[in-house]
Amino acid sequence: MAKIHYRVVRHDGGWAYKLGDVFSEAFTTRERAMAAARRVAAEQQVPGESGYIEYQTEDGKWHIELASGSDRPEADVVE
């Protein structure tokens, strides 16, 4: 099972949560960003329906694959 870690950081004049190099929208306080990050981390772990996804990799190639709705990562918020 994959593990992902959200981090709360200063961003765009406020606070945001971040996964890798991707930022959320900005929040006015660290507490609001932390609450949103915890909510998103919990939602990441909820199983869903299987379905096909399409995505582009850094080298510009497009891929289509079946994503299992039960293959969810373990997610948390690192303080």
Image: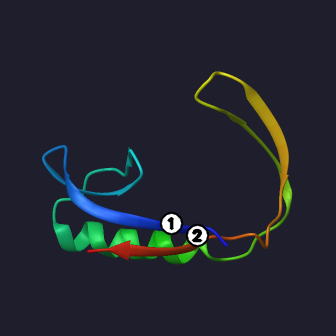
Q: Left or right of 71: which side holds 57?
A: left
Q: Are marks 1 and 2 in contact (CB under 8 Å)?
A: yes
Mark 1 or mark 2: whose residue is earlier in sequence = 1
Label 2's element? helix
Q: Is residue 51 above or below residue 7?
A: above
Asked whether, in this view, residue 24 is left or right of residue 63, the answer is left
Residue wearing tag 2? 44
**Residue visible at 44% across and 76% down in the picture:** 76
Question: Given the current orientation, which residue lies at the most extreme left position?
Answer: 13
Judged by depth in the image, the label closer to the viewer, 1 or 2, is: 1
Residue at the location (75% across, 28% down)?
62
Above or below for 67 versus 77: above
Residue 54 location, x and y as percent? 76, 38
Separation of marks 1 and 2 at Cα, in angstroms: 9 Å
The picture quadrant where one finds residue 49 is bottom right
Q: Tell me residue 38's x, y (percent).
A: 40, 76
At horizontal 78% and vertical 34% (from top left) the residue drawn is 63
Q: Quadrant of residue 67?
A: bottom right
Relative to the observer, which residue lies in front, 32 or 21?
A: 21
Q: Position of residue 14 (x, y in %)?
A: 15, 53
Residue 32 shown left or right of residue 73 in the figure: left
Q: Residue 30, which numbered label?
A: none
Quadrant containing the C terminus is bottom left
Q: Residue at x 68, y 71 (%)?
A: 72
Locate residue 70 relative to residue 12 in the image: left or right.
Answer: right
Q: How is the image coloured?
A: rainbow
Question: Helix or strand or loop: what does disc 1 sit on?
Answer: strand
Q: Which residue is mark 1?
A: 4
